[in-house]
Image (tube, rainbow, N blue to C red):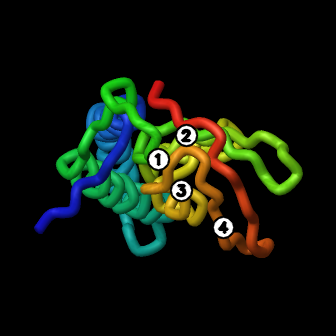
Amino acid sequence: MVEKEPMLKEGFDKLEAELKNLKSVERPAVVLAIEEARAHGDLSENAEYHAAKEKQGHIEGRIMELESKLSRAEVIDPATLSGERVMFGATITLLDEDDEEVKYQIVGADEGDVKAGRISFKSPIARALIGRKLGDEVEVKTPGGERYYEIDTVDYL
């Protein structure tokens, strides 16, 4: 069974744009660079040729990865969800042990950006939160030790 890859529309669009750029800009450019390097003769000592071939391998690998993710994508619009339970797409306000507020949105694996308050659904804190409800106290095991939070709000924006 193919495992679906949950993501927000914004994340899906970003991956789609990267794929389009790789196929329409990067791939043709590297093919041209390989042709130019070949024209220089002896390939065994041709650094430009080897660098271009290596870059081509990275581009083709990334294209395959993106096509796979996009084909398995399950685009979720948080605005269509509601309730007090924490699910993918939820924006959660937590109170830590010192009653300091922390706010996170649970997003797809490629969309995480802790500084922007977006955490991957695969992260330890998101895994600890998913399925819990408003008012629950949650224990999260982090590399820095255990942290305790209370779920203050659950929003689907």
Q: Amino acid at mark 2?
A: Gln
**Front in this rendered view, residue 118 or 34:** 118
Query: Of label 1 and label 4, which has the lower sequence position?
Result: 1
Residue 121, given in percent of the width and then of the height, sits at 46, 55
In the image, residue 142 above or below residue 103: below
Secondary structure type for disc 1 = loop
Distance of label 4 from label 3 (alpha carbons):
9 Å
Distance of label 3 from label 1 (alpha carbons):
6 Å
Residue visible at 23% across and 55% down?
4
Q: Are marks 3 and 1 in contact (CB under 8 Å)?
A: yes
Q: Amino acid at mark 4?
A: Glu
Residue 57, given in percent of the width and then of the height, sits at 35, 62
Q: Amino acid at mark 1?
A: Val
In the image, residue 104 above or below residue 56: above
Query: Of label 3 and label 1, which has the lower sequence position?
Result: 1
Q: Nearer the viewer, mark 1 or mark 2?
A: 1
Query: Of label 3 and label 2, which has the lower sequence position?
Result: 2
Q: Which residue is mark 1?
A: 86
Q: Which residue is mark 3?
A: 129
The circle drawn on residue 105 is 2
Secondary structure type for disc 2 = strand
The circle drawn on residue 150 is none
Q: Which residue is mark 4?
A: 139
Query: Of label 4 and label 3, which has the lower sequence position?
Result: 3
Q: Are marks 1 and 4 in contact (CB under 8 Å)?
A: no
Residue 124: image quadrant is bottom right
